[in-house]
Structure formats: structure tokens, C-alpha cells
Amino acid sequence: MRTTRTPIRRACLAAVAVSAALTLTACGGDSGSAASSPSASAETSADAHNAQDVSFAQGMIPHHQQAVEMAALADGRASAAEVKDLAARIEKAQGPEIETMTGWLKTWDEKVPEAMPGMDHSAHSGMAGMMDGADMEKLKKMSGKDFDSMFLTMMVEHHEGAVEMATTEKAKGGYPAATAMAGDIITTQNAEISEMKKLLGEN
């Protein structure tokens, strides 16, 4: 019985060893290519930005932050359901974009603008469409239809500034994700500008 089992056992062990070796070789080849591919593409992506991309992110972050702050005021102050709905959409869209742009700046080892709350509106009042501190304080004191009117008027101007900034990025930016976001901002905010002007009775 021993003489018959030993060759069979040896054959089985040899087969297992060969199978394991082949499996390890295959896995090693796959993991090697998988490991090198993402890192190479990540390096390429990180290098594909220019000064305009940095400027866009550093400018659009506080711009979006102010829009989100303005939109948050609508809850409890706005009277029209359309204004409340618009404000909710602005918060939902621009909050994640702030996070995305912050991530880009960190990846590029560039300065990230100071986050809310307590942002200094006067520091950015020269930026296209940005409200100054007095405007924001006035809006906070409004309610009902007066709030609706001022909110829509301010947000139209704010959106127009964002579209202007995004148009520059789309034309001069080098980072594909940033120019794509700029395109989305142009499309979305132009549509919202038309919507707000209708609510204001301007068209």
C-alpha cells in the first residue's frame, strides 16, 4: 500500500506546487502593472494644471462660499417657494464643488482660501459678482417678499460674476477637471440667472 501511495502523493504535491507557482506568477504580473498604471496617471493629472487653474480654484472657493451663505439665509426668510427651492439647489450644487476645488489646491500644494463661517467679505468684494459686508448684513435683516427681491437681485449679479470667472477658466485653464467644472458652472448658473430674472419679472 505504501509503494502505491507515495508516487501518487508525490505527483499530487508536484501538481499543486506547479499550479501555485503559475498562480503567483500571474498575480505578480497583474499587480505590478496595476500598481504602476494609477500612479503614472496620477502624476500626469497632477502636472496638468497651470496658474489659471490655481487662480480659478482660489477665487471660486470664496465665491461659492458666499453663494452658499446667501442661500442658507433663505430658510426662514424667503416667502416664495420658488426662491426656497432655488436656494436649496445652489447649496446642493456648490457645496461639493467647494470640496472638490479644495482637494485640487491641496494636491497642487497651493494655498486654500479661508473657509466659512466668519469669512471676510470685504477681502473679496473686488471679485466679480461678490457682495460686500454691508450687502450681506442688509440681506440678513430682510424677510418675506423684500428678502426674495433682494436675494434674487444679488444672486443674479453673483452668478454673472461666477460665469465670467468660469469662462476665463474654460478658455485658459489646463486642468481637465477644472475646465469641465467651469463648463458646468456656465451652463447651470446661466440657466439659474434666466430663472431668477423671470421671478423678478425682468423677462
Image (cartoon, rainbow, N blue to C red):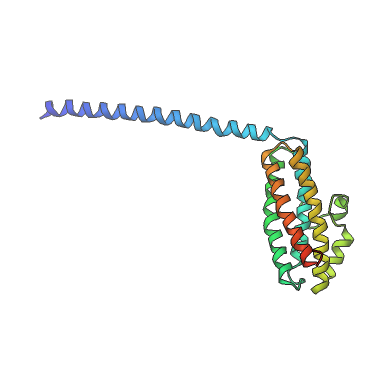
User: Closer to the camera, 93 or 32?
Assistant: 93
Residue occupying the far front of the picture: 203
User: Closer to the camera, 114 or 147?
Assistant: 147
Q: In the drawing, does residue 37 fall left or right of residue 57?
A: left
Instruction: Check the image and report above or below for 93 versus 57.
Output: below
Quarter location, residue 191: bottom right
At which x and y percent is residue 111? Answer: 77, 42
- Assign the N terminus to one quadrant of the image: top left
At which x and y percent is residue 92? Answer: 67, 58
How many numbered badges does the structure rendering display? 0
Can residue 56 be seen by looking at this rendering?
yes
Can residue 98 be seen by looking at this rendering?
no
Quarter location, residue 38: top right
At which x and y percent is residue 90? Answer: 71, 59
Residue occupying the far left of the picture: 1
What residue sits 67% from the left and 35% below the top? 46
- Assign the C terminus to one quadrant of the image: bottom right
What residue sits 87% from the left and 53% below the top? 125
Instruction: Check the image and report above or below for 152 versus 175.
Output: below
User: Closer to the camera, 32 or 187?
Assistant: 187
What residue sits 77% from the left and 50% below the top? 163
